[in-house]
Image (cartoon, helix red, strand yellow):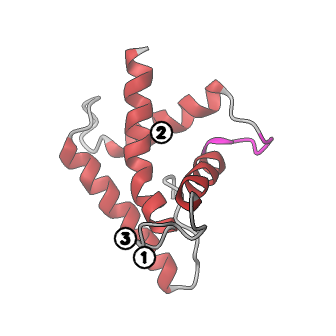
Amino acid sequence: MKRFLMLTALAMVAAAPVVMAEGYGDGRGSGGHGGRGVQMLKMLFRHHDVDKDGVITKYEFLKVSKERFERMDADSDGKVTGEEAKEHAKKMKKRFMERRKQGEGNPPSDAE
């Protein structure tokens, strides 16, 4: 259970730059009151519903979280340091900004 909670927390940390990017940095999200929360749910659903059947199974959630953890763990030591998390967030933000310049408004998937 402790490991599951840690993976969940790390997944949310990794998703933060994407969620912030979806709100375009205005602190409100694009949907007015509650827009940011709705966008976060949509983004999380989009990334975790691997087979696109409209539900997220425990397997799908853990699979995506494990893959994200492995990308964040730059030195593959089984631990994600604060520095590794920051570097991962910077990469995600950079990819988003590149896509935005190219006219693609959606944030990048963590898997790209």
Give the mark nearer the N terminus: 3 vs 2: 2
Residue at the spot 24% in from the left edge and 40% down from the top edge: 75
Residue at the spot 20% in from the left edge and 43% down from the top edge: 82
Task: Say which of 30 and 15 sits in front.
Answer: 30
| Amino acid beneath label 1 | Met
Identify residue for label 2: 67
Identify residue for label 3: 94
* 6 left or right of 66 in image: left
* 92 left or right of 85 in image: right
Find numbered disc 1 in the image and state the secondary structure of the residue it sits on: helix
> How packed is label 3: few (under 14 Cα within 10 Å), some, or many (20 or more)?
some
| Amino acid beneath label 2 | Glu
Task: Say which of 75 and 53 sits in front.
Answer: 53
- Any magenta on residue 53? yes
Q: Which residue lies furthest to the front in this view?
A: 33
Identify residue for label 1: 97
Q: Is the magenta stretch mostly helix, strand or loop?
A: loop
| Amino acid beneath label 3 | Lys
Mark 1 in CB contact with mark 2 (< 8 angstroms): no
Task: Say which of 110 and 14 sits in front.
Answer: 14
In the image, residue 10 lies at what x, y percent?
Answer: 37, 38
Task: Assign the N terminus to one quadrant of the image.
Answer: top left
Mark 3 in CB contact with mark 2 (< 8 angstroms): no
Find numbered disc 3 in the image and state the secondary structure of the residue it sits on: helix
Over which residues does the magenta segment extend? 48-54
* 110 left or right of 17 in image: right
